[in-house]
Image (cartoon, rainbow, N blue to C red):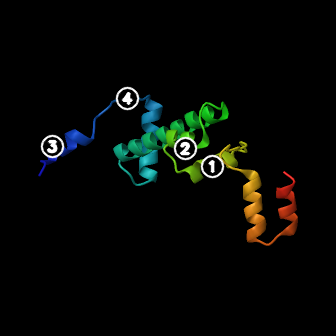
Amino acid sequence: MMRREELKMSTTSTKSIHLTKEEIELVRTLAEQEYLSESVLLKKLFREGLRNHLKEIAITAYTKEMVSIGEAAQMAKMPYLAFFEELRRRRIVVLDESINLKAELSDLAEKFANERLAQVSENM
């Protein structure tokens, strides 16, 4: 069994940053408002910022057509559907080349017994 010191050393690392007086005061205020210690609040804010940064990098890569939507979701460390919803929320058009629209429409027409939809899929 690992000792507490060994476990802590193997899973975490301390990094330091310099904060302005205003930033320090803001951290104190927010920590009090959220009933958190300053260190817990800073870790929470760091993680949120890191997640947002990864998401922005992934969205940029996707919109520049450097990666597929699946690859972008992996870059953002998000589930595919959550990433898809984020793109939709931002009104970014999602065209996934893996989707065969004609086949999808045909399947839907069959599932819902919709003759009009079946005609549309046949005319594609």
Q: Are marks 2 and 1 in contact (CB under 8 Å)?
A: yes
Mark 1 lies on a secondary structure that is helix
Q: Is label 3 or label 2 in front? A: 2
Percent position of residue 61, x then y = 60, 32
Mark 2 Cα within 10 Å, few/some/many (few <14, many 20+)?
many
Q: Which numbered circle lies on residue 73?
A: 2
In space, the residues marked 4 and 1 are separated at their CA atoms by: 34 Å
What's the amino acid at mark 1? Answer: Phe
Q: Is label 3 or label 1 in front? A: 1
Percent position of residue 2, x then y = 13, 48
What's the amino acid at mark 4? Answer: Ile
Mark 4 Cα within 10 Å, few/some/many (few <14, many 20+)?
few
Mark 3 lies on a secondary structure that is helix
Picture residue at 19% right of the left edge, 45% below the top? 7
* Mark earlier in primary sequence (4, 2): 4
Percent position of residue 101, x then y = 75, 52
Task: Decide: is 52 above or below 35.
Answer: above
Which is nearer the eye, 21 or 86? 86
In space, the residues marked 4 and 2 are separated at their CA atoms by: 30 Å
Q: Which numbered circle lies on residue 5?
A: 3
